[in-house]
């Protein structure tokens, strides 16, 4: 990873991009990717697409989603304490004692998620009951009126205040790797294509979609706008060697062992076969996983859009998903980029991916 790429990685992942409010992160992403592409556009809700060879009739998508889980202010007590509800798959259990940022009417408002001291809680409740009623955000206001004067309103969005760190020279850890790390990886594919002077015989739509965390909504919208012939989606999956996972139920994937290629109804068998071939021919390590009725990723939205889009999923193994310490192995990140890049480079325009010909 060169210094320019690393600077982009840190500035992009440290930005705020909560579901429905992804503008800050999208601006950073577009600024980085535009020099490596021919044109770009955004849609009504903020999905961003940078395009290489936009006039080509055959269209290929490489896609990630940019939104992170967050909170909405739902109630402010007379004493100035703030109660929140989830925006996406946010976890009440991890909130207590975390620093936070309220995106208020007058700018950013620092806050903390408070929690009573261990020695004043009932012993039977030790460890805590944490839910919408008990998790409280404190911005230092002494009343609801004071909180409102500071810019806190019902509907204000809240994100955790955590920054990306590096561990053991091998891992990066922080919030929102799910899935802004995907946005980093697809942007790096565009960079490599440009710097290696690759002339693609098709249009490549490098797509950073919004609102995945609340039901794949951004991908649904942008898939209908682009109308691609092929889509390669990147997202994250669980490192099931970490404590708390059941490999019988959740499979056997781990960080450091390479990208995960998934079998699922929405994953097109012929596209998946090509990804396996590329990985083997280029000696890129990979892992396999099986998913049930739905992948739970934007793969589903693209695959079932329009008249059906041949789609596949490349996942990055991740520890501690939906927390502020999501961890990914730097070699896995590089290998996901390599796999997408090599697949795109060898793909021919007009490839027919019909299952039965």
Image (cartoon, rainbow, N blue to C red):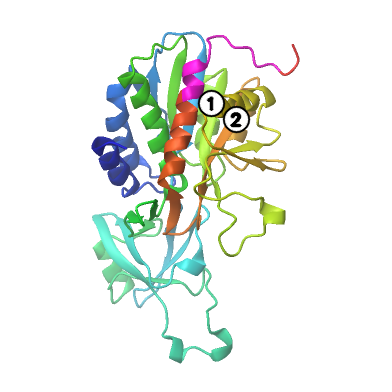
State the separation of the CA atoms marked 2 and 1: 14 Å
Q: Earlier in the sequence, mark 2 or mark 1?
A: 1
x then y, percent, for residue 297 = 57, 40
Which image quarter is the C terminus in? top right
Q: Residue at x 37, y 20 (%)?
A: 193
Q: Residues within 10 Å of mark 1 (few under 14, many from 20)?
A: many
- Pointer 2 with pointer 1, Cβ within 8 A: no
Q: Residues within 10 Å of mark 2 (few under 14, many from 20)?
A: many
x then y, percent, for residue 208 = 43, 33
In the rendered image, which residue does mark 1 sit on?
223
Q: As drawn, which residue projects farthest toward the right?
A: 356
Foreground tag (2 vs 1): 2
* Element under disc 2: strand
Judge by depth and name the residue closer to the eye, 136 or 129: 129
Judge by depth and name the residue closer to the eye, 52 or 304: 52
> Which segment is the magenta one?
342-354
* Element under disc 1: helix
Quarter holding residue 206: top left
Q: Is residue 271 above or below residue 253?
A: above
x then y, percent, for residue 2 = 27, 36
In the rendered image, which residue does mark 2 sit on?
312
Instruction: State left or right for residue 34 relative to residue 259.
Output: left
Q: Residue at x 66, y 26 (%)?
A: 268
Which image quarter is the N terminus in? top left
Quarter holding residue 36: top left
Secondary structure mostly seen in magenta is loop
Q: Is residue 296 above or below residue 282?
A: below
Quarter holding residue 165: bottom left
Asked if residue 272 can be seen in this view, the reply is: yes
- All told, the count of numbered labels is 2
Judge by depth and name the residue closer to the eye, 206 or 261: 261
Asked if residue 70 can be seen in this view, the reply is: no
């Amino acid at each position: 990873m060169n210094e320019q790429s690393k600077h982009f990685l840190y500035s992009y992942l440290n930005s705020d991009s909560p579901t429905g409010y992804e503008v800050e992160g999208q601006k950073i992403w577009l600024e980085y990717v535009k020099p490596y592409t021919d044109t770009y556009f955004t849609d009504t809700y903020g999905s961003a697409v940078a395009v290489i060879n936009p006039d080509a009739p055959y269209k290929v998508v490489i896609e990630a989603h940019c939104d992170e889980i967050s909170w909405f202010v739902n109630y402010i007590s007379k004493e100035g304490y703030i109660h929140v509800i989830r925006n996406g798959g946010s976890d009440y259990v991890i909130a207590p004692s975390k620093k936070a940022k309220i995106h208020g009417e007058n700018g950013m408002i620092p806050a903390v998620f408070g929690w009573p001291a261990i020695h004043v809680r009932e012993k039977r409740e030790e460890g805590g009951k944490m839910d919408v009623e008990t998790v409280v955000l404190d911005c230092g206001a002494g009343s609801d009126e004071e909180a409102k004067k500071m810019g806190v309103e019902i509907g204000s969005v809240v994100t955790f205040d955590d920054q990306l760190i590096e561990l053991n020279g091998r891992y990066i850890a922080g919030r929102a790797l799910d899935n802004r790390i995907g946005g980093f990886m697809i942007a790096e594919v565009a960079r490599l294509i440009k710097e290696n002077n690759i002339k693609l015989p098709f249009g490549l739509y490098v797509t950073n979609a919004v609102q995945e965390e609340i039901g794949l909504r951004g991908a649904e919208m942008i898939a209908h706008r682009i109308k691609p012939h092929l889509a390669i989606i990147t997202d994250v999956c669980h490192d099931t060697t970490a404590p708390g996972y059941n490999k019988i139920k959740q499979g056997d994937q781990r960080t450091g062992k390479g990208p995960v290629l998934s079998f699922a109804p929405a994953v097109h068998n012929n596209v998946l076969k090509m990804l396996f071939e590329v990985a083997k021919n280029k000696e890129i390590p990979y892992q396999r996983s099986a998913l049930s009725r739905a992948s739970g990723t934007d793969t589903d939205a693209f695959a079932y859009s329009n008249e059906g889009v041949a789609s596949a999923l490349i996942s990055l193994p991740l520890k501690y998903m939906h927390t502020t310490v999501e961890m990914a192995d730097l070699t896995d990140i590089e290998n996901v980029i390599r796999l997408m890049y090599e697949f795109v480079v060898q793909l021919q325009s007009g490839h027919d991916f019909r299952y039965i010909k």
